[in-house]
Amino acid sequence: MAKDKINIQLTTDVFRISFPHLFKPYAPKGSANEPKYSCDMLFTDKAAVEKIQKACAQILTQKFGSDKTKWPKLKYPVIKDGNEKENITGYEGTKYVTARSNSQPTVVDRDKQEILEERAVYAGAYCRAQISLYWYEMAGNKGIGVGLNAVQFVKDGPSFGAGKVNVNAAFGDDLPDDGADDPANYGNETDDTGF
């Protein structure tokens, strides 16, 4: 394999998915970056993380040789500490990897049938992914990138989002009278706030 085309494909162990943008490309507001398909993969299993570390080490060995003292320190590490995002639900106590793609990844269920419904893969679900780890040198930056090829939904998990509203708590049993929604019952007065 040519040194400038180092690319390792890897199927991850099971992780919890966060910020899944699998059906529509996404870029943060105000970002100059091109929108991409992406997700964060949150791991709690040490062996799952070591599998990715081993692939990264293989890339660095192919690029720079087996002497680890000659390996560059990566400006953007592949595996990040979830405790640095402990204010975001699900990250505390994990290691996480962000994977991105310019093209839409294949998304399948446990039976490897394609998933077309965006809501089926939500933040907090358990998934696996096929990723590509590769060496890049671009615009003065060097490092290991993580491409997102495919995602497999494995099983449901508690949602990281707000979840469904408890409609009984939200609305109770007190329905308004039949005429409550009649515009004739609304006054034209406004208070001094202008509302």
Image: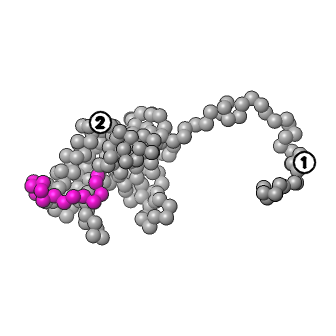
Most foreground residue, 115 or 188? 188
Q: Nearer the viewer, residue 153 or 20?
A: 20
To which quarter of the image does residue 147 belong?
A: bottom left
- Residue 49 relative to residue 177: left or right: left
Query: Which residue is located at x 89 percent, y 45 percent?
Result: 185
State the extent of the magenta-drawn residues as a range.
65-78
- Secondary structure, mark 1, is helix
Give SS at disc 2.
loop
Residue 130: give x, y in percent of width and height: 31, 46
Q: Quadrant of residue 61?
A: bottom left
Q: Residue at x 40, y 37 (%)?
A: 126
Vertical side of 70 occupied by 55: above or below: above
Magenta stretch holds residue 40: no
The disc placed on residue 45 is 2
- 67 is higher (above) or lower (below) than 89: below
User: In the picture, which quadrant includes the N terminus?
Assistant: bottom left
Q: What is the crowding at mark 1: few (fewer than 14 residues within 10 Å), some, or many (at least 20)?
A: few
Residue that label 1 marks: 184
Looking at the rendered structure, the kind of residue marked 1 is Ala
Q: What's the amino acid at mark 2? A: Asp
Res. 15 in view: no
- Mostly what secondary structure, the magenta segment? loop
As measured in the structure, the alpha-carbon distance from the residue carrying label 2 to the one carrying label 1 is 62 Å
Can you give x and y, in whole percent of width and height, for residue 70 in the image?
12, 59
In depth, the one of 47 and 195 nearer the eye is 195
Give how far across and how far down residue 173 sits, in percent: 74, 29
Left-right relation of 42 to 171: left
For mark 2, does the 10 Å Cα neighbourhood hold few (<14), some (14 to 19), or many (20 or more) residues?
few
